[in-house]
Image (cartoon, rainbow, N blue to C red):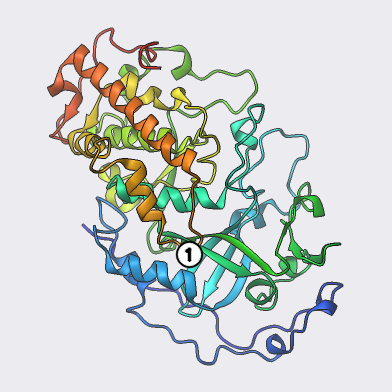
């Protein structure tokens, strides 16, 4: 089953608005923008981003060895940018940010929507933290930086694991003056550009408590690296719903969720819709494994395409808080797997293969990431941490098999109902940790 589109909404055409004057505008010429039209920009129904959209199925975002995805990656790396704007969630926060809240709402980490010459769009997340820097131990996961290289690495890892649920992502060196300031006709975005004391061009998020120069990102003096993640089809063409993660964290300093207190939590969950559906529960196990490997503790929701109902795959979106620490493995991310003790057999076979000497996960990732324009994407300690964490995942599954048998744990028939295990659910053992 594939997504079917009733229509494709074309972007507006016509003259570009002339930028209003501002302090920053006086430092940069905008003669190309003042009388600019969309001449020379053509819409092609065979363009890679549309082929990517049309290739989405009930099983994944794209097929193995997708030519459309490879072309889409190249396009995001090279095509001229014709428009830039804040993302929708940042716009909704304009004037609504609450400085007293510890948990930062979505959108406060600067990101932009860039439109390319072929009308494709991508989410741009700029460099905020150097690759060699680890997240400090005292920083909570819900106030951590979002890392552009984590988005890129997450796409490659997801593809290596054969999930194919992360939208294509690529690195790119952006000229913030030419590719953002000079092409945008959005006054809110133009108004937050400035030149730093070091003569670097900078900009920041349009939100009350982060609308300050100390939250800005800066070029060097114009060039800034970041990640570009391909947009999914519009919600009008391919509706999606966001569902709370049943293993979501409390997002407070002291609060605890039920799954942290009840070792039989998964047995109760198996009796509730939609987790009575075996596919949904197994997809949650895939997500937990994926998040553990990248070290992402911030999975409070997940999304699905409504067209596929309960049988559709889970989208692995917003992975920028992964790869923050290579020196620590957060075992609580694996609690879904240790409590439920089920995993797809093909996932298990792939994980075992990537733990072998011939196809070691770190080696495969290193080779895959090496083609990105911003390579190296991950430092060696992060790559080696993937191997270490993969062994921990295998140990958890092997422990489950010893307790309940291979047939009950390694699920080949993803359509058969799963029965709760009696008195089996427990936290990870010391041996596993």
Residue 62 placement: quadrant: bottom left
Q: Residue at x 48, y 26 (%)?
A: 330
Residue 84 placement: quadrant: bottom right
Does residue 138 sit above or below 52 in this rendering? above
Does residue 377 sit above or below 30 in this rendering? above
7 and 409: which is toward the camera: 409
241 and 60: which is toward the camera: 60
Q: Residue at x 41, y 63 (%)?
A: 233
Does residue 212 sit above or below 132 in this rendering? below
The residue lying furthest to the top in this view is 423
**Residue 26, position as x, y percentages in the image:** 85, 79
Does residue 82 sit above or below 123 in this rendering? below
Give the labeled residue for mark 1.
373
- Give neighbour class at mark 1: few <14, some 14-19, many 20+ (Cα, 10 Å): some
* Marker count (numbered): 1
Asked if residue 398 can be seen in this view, the reply is yes
- The quadrant the N terminus occupies is bottom left
416 and 149: which is toward the camera: 149
- Give the structural element (helix, strand or loop) at label 1: loop
**Residue 410, position as x, y percentages in the image:** 18, 28
**Residue 218, position as x, y percentages in the image:** 72, 60
Q: Residue at x 78, y 46 (%)?
A: 209
Asked if residue 212 can be seen in this view, the reply is no
- The quadrant the C terminus occupies is top left
Q: Is residue 77 left or right of residue 124?
A: left
**Residue 294, position as x, y percentages in the image:** 45, 38
Q: Is residue 183 left or right of residue 284?
A: right
217 and 55: which is toward the camera: 217
């Amino acid at each position: 089953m594939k997504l079917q589109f009733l229509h494709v909404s074309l972007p507006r055409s016509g003259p570009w608005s002339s930028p209003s004057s501002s302090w920053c505008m006086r430092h940069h010429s905008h003669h190309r923008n003042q009388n600019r039209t969309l001449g020379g920009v053509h819409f092609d129904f065979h363009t890679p981003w549309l082929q990517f959209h049309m290739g989405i199925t009930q099983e994944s975002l794209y097929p193995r060895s997708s030519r459309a995805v490879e072309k889409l990656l190249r396009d995001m790396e090279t095509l001229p940018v014709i428009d830039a704007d804040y993302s929708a969630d940042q716009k909704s926060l304009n004037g609504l940010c609450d400085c007293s809240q510890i948990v930062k709402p979505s959108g406060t980490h600067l990101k932009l929507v860039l439109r390319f010459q072929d009308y494709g769009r991508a989410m741009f997340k700029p460099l905020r933290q150097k690759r060699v820097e680890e997240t400090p131990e005292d920083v909570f996961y819900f106030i951590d930086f979002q890392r552009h290289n984590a988005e890129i690495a997450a796409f490659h890892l997801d593809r290596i694991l054969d999930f194919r649920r992360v939208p294509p992502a690529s690195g790119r060196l952006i000229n913030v003056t030419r590719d953002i300031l000079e092409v945008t006709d959005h006054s809110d975005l133009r108004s937050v550009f400035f030149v730093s004391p070091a003569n670097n061009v900078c900009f920041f998020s349009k939100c009350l408590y982060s609308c300050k120069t100390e939250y800005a990102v800066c070029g060097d003096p114009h060039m800034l690296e970041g990640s570009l993640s391909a947009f999914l089809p519009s919600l009008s063409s391919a509706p999606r719903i966001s569902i709370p993660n049943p293993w979501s964290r409390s997002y407070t300093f002291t609060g605890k969720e039920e799954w942290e207190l009840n070792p039989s939590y998964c047995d109760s969950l198996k009796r509730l819709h939609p987790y009575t559906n075996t596919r949904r529960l197994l997809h949650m196990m895939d997500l937990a494994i994926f998040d553990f490997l990248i070290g992402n503790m911030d999975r409070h929701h997940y999304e699905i395409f409504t067209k596929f109902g309960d049988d559709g795959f889970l989208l692995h979106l917003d992975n920028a808080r992964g790869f923050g620490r290579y020196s620590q493995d957060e075992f609580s991310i694996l609690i879904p797997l240790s409590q439920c003790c089920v995993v797809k057999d093909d996932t298990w076979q792939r994980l075992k293969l990537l733990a072998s000497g011939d196809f070691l996960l770190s080696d495969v990732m290193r080779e895959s990431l090496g083609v990105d324009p911003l390579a190296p994407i991950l430092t060696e300690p992060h790559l080696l941490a993937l191997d270490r964490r993969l062994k921990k995942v295998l140990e958890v599954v092997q422990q489950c098999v010893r307790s309940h048998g291979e047939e009950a744990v390694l699920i080949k028939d993803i359509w058969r109902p799963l029965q709760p295990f009696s008195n089996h659910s427990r936290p990870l053992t010391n041996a596993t940790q």
